[in-house]
Image (spheres, rainbow, N blue to C red):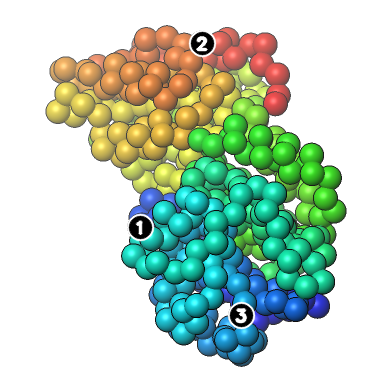
Amino acid sequence: MGIRITDKVTWVGKVDWELQKFHGEELSTHKGSTYNSYLIQDEKNVLIDTVWAPYRDEFIARLQETIPLDQIDYIVVNHAEPDHSGSLPALMKLIPDTPVYCTANGVKSLRGMYHQDWDYRVVKTGAKLDIGSQELLFVEAPMLHWPDTMFTYAMGEGILFSTDAFGQHYASETLYNDRVDQAELMHECLKYYANILTPFSRQVDRKIKEWVGLNLPLRMICPSHGVIWRDNPLQIVEQYTRWANNYQENQVTIIYDTMWNSTKKMAEAIARGISEADGSISVKLFNVGKQDKNDIITEVFKSRAILVGSSTINRGILSAVAGILEEIKGLSFSGKKAAAFGSYGWSGESVKIITQELQAGGFEVINEGLKCLWTPDQENETRCYEFGQEMVAALEGWKKV
């Protein structure tokens, strides 16, 4: 059976405790996830989103335990990504004439993925659907995080169905934000924002201002992943506003990979230089060849500055460093400083390559970087130490966002 969250709204989704990777192999999900689908039962019955296709049979069975399928009057697709629409083809085989409400881009996405010409009903911001005792209000939210995305607001319930916005990859049987570990929850929210929504921060900020301007009562926020925000739901909206505006903590993150520990020694000496120049700065070191890249990117999001290091190999950089630089570049961070470092044996191209990638990613690169031939001796460890202090000097005048 589904879980009733109000007299008229029932959660009919799936908790996926085993999920460890998402978007193929791109995103780590250490805490699993949920695929949230909601059924509104009024004079007209509305299903909002479905679940990922591997769980379609379980989903349809749960839905049938809650309502006869032929009593579903409308289906709303807030977001056509397969983790939310994946069970739609199987469901539509059973109720093929049910109207599907989505944006114009939603139609393109659904047709492109499933090659079906269902009864699409295109909606725009401000459109309403009368379902009996209340209306559903649709608000387009393009690029949060696909072009097709929209929100649905149940006006009688005061519930915002926010699709991926305000969600997190966090499995929980307790369903609600006030019934889970708060530190875990906020960490997963931050990781979700940093790794998925960062490139769309301007749209996030604009959409939040638009939503607040509607001055509608907000009883709950029901996202498509993770917990439902029923206890002070505005807390996550306020947090998104902070994250969307060049969020920084007093932190410097050092990212590196190393072949024979020479670059590692450089990273550790740089860290000492930063810490001893300003003990208030939190300095974190990550070997990207050994540690989770999405957790590292979350730390980059929090940071005032990053330093990236790699050995030189085949006139290039180590593959783990190249990979995370490509992801960081795509996330379009802003307002952050950076510098490159690395060891080499003969050609030494790594620092120049990293510097170029950081510049392409929108970072303010403070210098030409630091190279060390072979393993750092005492003199070169001192240079690394001073390199860290140089970063602290570049950060003077910083104000917390």
> Rounded to the nearest whole Å, what is the CA distance between mark 3 and mark 1?
25 Å
* Residue at image location 42% in from the left, 9% down from the top: 367
From the viewer's perspective, tell me whether residue 5 is left or right of residue 11: right
| In the depicted structure, whether residue 274 falls above or below residue 19 | above
Q: What residue sits right under mark 3 in the picture?
A: 72
**Image quadrant in which the N terminus is located:** bottom right
Q: Position of residue 318 (x, y in %)?
A: 26, 34
Residue 294 versus residue 280 in the image, above or below: below
Image position of 11 with respect to 199: above or below: below
Place of residue 187 in the rendered image (x, y in percent of width and height, measured from the top left):
62, 49
Identify which residue is drawn at 37% across, 10% down.
368
In the picture of the structure, the residue carrying the numbered disc 2 is 390
Q: Where on the picture, by quarter, is residue 176?
A: bottom right
Q: Amino acid at mark 1?
A: Gly
Drawn side of residue 369 relative to residue 316, left or right? right
Q: Please state which of residues 254 and 192 is positioned toward the viewer in this rendering.
A: 192
Quadrant housing the C terminus? top right
Q: Please tell me which residue lies in front, 142 or 184.
A: 142
Q: CA distance from mark 3 to mark 2?
A: 64 Å
Q: Earlier in the sequence, mark 3 or mark 1?
A: 3
The amino acid sitting under disc 3 is Ile
Q: Dot 1 corresponds to which residue? A: 112
Residue at the image point whose x is 51% and y is 19% from the top:
337
Categorize mark 3 by other alpha carbons within 10 Å: few (<14), some (14-19), many (20+). some
Badge 1 crowding class, 10 Å Cα cut-off, few under 14, some 14 to 19, many 20 or more, is few
- Residue 164 in the image: above or below residue 265: below
Residue 196, horizontal then vertical, whole percent = 50, 45
Q: Secondary structure at mark 1?
A: helix
Q: Nearer the viewer, residue 319 or 11?
A: 11
Label 1, label 2: how many angstroms apart (C-alpha)? 52 Å
Amino acid type shown at disc 2? Glu
Q: Is residue 188 among the parts visible in the rendering?
A: no
